[in-house]
């Protein structure tokens, strides 16, 4: 990882937009600070497209797509995307309702089996707003030790589901996408972006394990300073790193991008 200050101007000028994670990248322990929100508005006014890419529920994505200065929100680790269309919000989900129902039953069975072994396996309080996955709370309203999280993850995989790990949740899913593939597929469908070109035209900012696919896929990648705590889960670290953590780090990334493009 190199200091943000070394980001070359021509690399910054070649970008169409910025993809960004929410928890512990833009948000500080779940809260949106004024510097982080100002940074989003500054990027938007400068003409950069903005797309949030999060493990949070599609129900949250509907609100964010409606209210924030963004062009879209990819939610549930790549499975469902939302975008404002006039006064409505469009939802892109590749599965039909019958598939959603059967996958939900299967995930509930997996969670019930896990709870027989792990009393810590509690559903996150945002699970009701999810369409495709379930999230176990490992760092939001309770702190589950890392070794227990690792055993929970191994158990879930043995039961046949995919897992993603953020700083707050262990996600269990039956979807085929991760944050990178889901985002690239959606950018193609929504903006006509060629997936290979999009890897150079869109930058990504993130902080933790469920950002691994995006740190690997995109050419210009940023970490907020707290990404250092998750480097063991990132086969490819971000190329550029901020000195500040969370929302302040995101504001630093935005300021550097805008200065380099000016
Ligand atoms: Mg995060």
Image: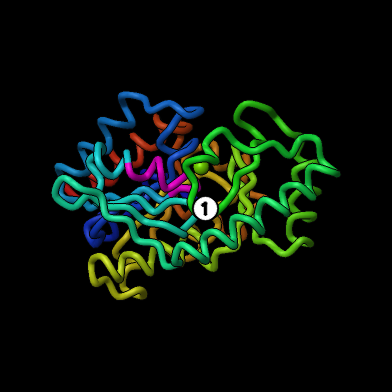
Place of residue 114 in the rendered image (x, y in percent of width and height, measured from the top left): 78, 47
Residue at 29% of width from left, 64% of height from top? Answer: 201
**Count of number-bearing discs:** 1
- The residue pinned by badge 1 equals 211
Place of residue 5 in the rendered image (x, y in percent of width and height, measured from the top left): 36, 44
Label 1 neighbour load within 10 Å: few <14, some 14-19, many 20+: many
**Figure colour scheme:** rainbow
Outermost residue toward the right? 117
What's the magenta region?
A: 54-62
Residue at 15% of width from left, 50% of height from top? Answer: 47
The question of residue 57 being in magenta is answered with yes
Q: Is residue 222 visible?
A: no
The question of residue 115 being in magenta is answered with no
Residue at 46% of width from left, 62% of height from top? Answer: 97
Residue 9, quarter of picture: bottom left
Q: Is residue 211 visible?
A: yes
Residue at 45% of width from left, 31% of height from top? Answer: 244
SS at badge 1: helix
> Is ligand 1 less than 8 Å from the beta carbon at label 1?
yes
Q: Nearer the viewer, residue 82 or 238?
A: 82
Q: Nearer the viewer, residue 127 or 200?
A: 127
| Residue 195 drawn above or below residue 115 | below
Q: Nearer the viewer, residue 19 or 64?
A: 64
Q: Left or right: 125 with respect to 246?
A: right
| Residue 168 drawn above or below residue 200 | above
Q: Left or right: 47 with respect to 116?
A: left
Residue 34, quarter of picture: top left
Place of residue 135 in the rendered image (x, y in percent of width and height, measured from the top left): 60, 44
Q: Left or right: 34 with respect to 143?
A: left
Place of residue 198 in the rendered image (x, y in percent of width and height, measured from the top left): 32, 68
């Amino acid at each position: 990882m190199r200091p943000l200050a070394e980001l070359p101007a021509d690399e910054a000028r070649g970008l169409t937009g910025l993809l960004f994670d929410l928890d512990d990248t833009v948000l500080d322990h779940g809260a949106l600070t004024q510097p982080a929100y100002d940074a989003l508005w500054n990027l938007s006014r400068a003409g950069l497209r903005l797309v949030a890419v999060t493990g949070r529920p599609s129900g949250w994505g509907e609100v964010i797509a409606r209210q924030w200065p963004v062009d879209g929100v990819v939610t549930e680790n790549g499975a469902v995307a939302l975008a404002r269309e006039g006064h409505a919000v469009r939802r892109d989900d590749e599965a039909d309702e019958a598939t959603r129902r059967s996958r939900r039953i299967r995930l509930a069975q997996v969670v019930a089996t896990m709870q027989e072994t792990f009393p810590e396996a509690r559903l996150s309080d945002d699970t009701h707003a999810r369409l495709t996955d379930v999230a176990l709370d490992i760092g939001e309203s309770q702190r589950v030790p890392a070794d227990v999280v690792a055993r929970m993850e191994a158990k879930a995989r043995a039961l046949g589901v995919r897992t993603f790990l953020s700083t707050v949740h262990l996600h269990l899913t039956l979807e085929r996408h991760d944050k990178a593939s889901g985002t690239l597929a959606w950018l193609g469908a929504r903006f006509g972006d060629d997936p290979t070109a999009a890897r150079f035209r869109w930058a990504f900012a993130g902080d933790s394990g469920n950002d691994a696919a995006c740190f690997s896929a995109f050419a210009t990648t940023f970490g907020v300073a707290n990404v250092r705590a998750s480097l063991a889960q990132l086969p490819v670290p971000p190329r550029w790193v901020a000195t500040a953590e969370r929302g302040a780090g995101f504001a630093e990334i935005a300021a550097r991008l805008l200065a380099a493009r000016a």
